[in-house]
Amino acid sequence: MNTLYGPILIVEDVPNVLELLEVTLRFKGYAVLTAHNGEEALETIARQRPVLIITDILMPKMDGYAFVQKLRLNPDTRSLPVVFLSATYVTPEDKEFALSLGAARFMEKPIDTEDFLLTVAELVTQQPHTAPQPLDMERFYLGYRTRLENKLRHKNTQITRAERLLTTLPVDQRPAFEALLQQSIRDRDEIQAELYGIYKTIEELKNEEPKKEEPRKE
C-alpha cells in the first residue's frame, strides 16, 4: 500500500503497545516513526518532521506532558498536532491539562482501533493546524505537579491494596498479582522521581522571581 502522507511519530515505552500501534498504522498505508520516551522523540523530530504525533503520557526520562510542552515552546514544532494516549492519566482534570498543552485529542487505553484510525485520518487530512500558544512555565509546572501528586496517591493506594490482597490469595493465584504489584511499584517510582524534579524546578522559578523584580540602580 502506498504511503499517503508524511510519517506519524508514535512515542510509547511499552513494547507490545508500540508494536500494535505501528502495525495498525502501517497496515493502513501510513509511514511510521517510533520513539520510547520524550527525549528520544525530540531527537527523532530533529531528523525527520512528522505530520502527527501520538504519545503516551507516563514514560521514563521525559514523559508526554513535558515532551509536548517542549514542542509548544519551540516555534518550529509548535504547530505539530498531538494525540495523547493514557491508561493512567484519565481523570477529567488530566484530560483538561493535556488539552491545555495544545493536544488535538485525548484517547484512553486500551485503544479502540476503529476510533483510533478515524482520529488519525481526521488529523492528517486537516493540515495545517493552528499553532497553540504554549503555557507559561509556572502554570505548566503547577498543573503538572498536581497531576503527578494525584497519580502518586492513586499508585500508593493500589500498592497497599495489592500487598494486602497477596496475603489472602491461594498460592497458584499469587504470581499474576505479584506482577501487578511490581508494575505498580515501578510506576510509583517513576512518578515520584518526576515529582521530585518538578518540586526542584518550581523552587528555582520562585527564587528567580525576586531577581526579576529588583529595580535597576541608576
Image: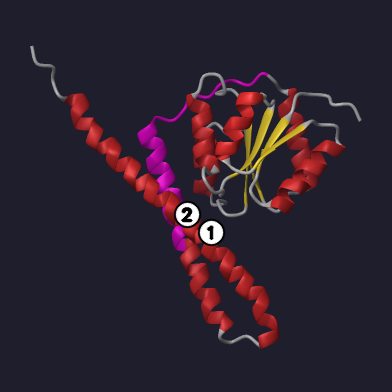
Residue 39 screen position, x and y as percent: 55, 37
> What range is drawn magenta here?
128-153
Q: Residue at x 76, y 47 (%)?
A: 19
Q: Looking at the picture, does residue 40 appear above or below residue 86?
A: above
Left or right: 25 in relation to 50: right
Q: Looking at the rendering, which quadrant does residue 182 occupy?
A: bottom right
Secondary structure of the residue carrying tag 2 is: helix
Q: What crowding class fits label 1: few (fewer than 14 Cα within 10 Å), some (14-19), or many (20 or more)?
A: some
Q: Mark 2 = which residue?
A: 191
Comparing 199 with 107, the one in front is 199
Q: Amino acid at mark 2?
A: Ile
Which colour assignment does the render follow?
secondary structure
Seen in the picture, residue 30 relative to 13 is either above or below; the reply is: above
Give the number of the disc on residue 50: none
Q: Secondary structure at mark 1?
A: helix
Quadrant of the image occupied by residue 126: top right
**Quadrant hosting residue 162:** bottom right
Give the farthest residue toward the top.
Answer: 218
Quadrant position of the C terminus in the picture: top left
Horizontal and vertical percent for residue 108?
65, 49
Q: CA separation, marks 2 and 1?
A: 6 Å
Q: Is residue 137 magenta?
A: yes
Amino acid at the residue labelled 1: Asp
Q: Quadrant of the N terminus?
A: top right
**Residue denoted by label 1:** 187
The reply to whether callout 2 and callout 1 are in contact (CB within 8 Å) is yes
Could you say where residue 184 lies in the image, as x and y percent from the top left? 55, 64
Residue situated in front as seen by the camera: 3 or 149: 3
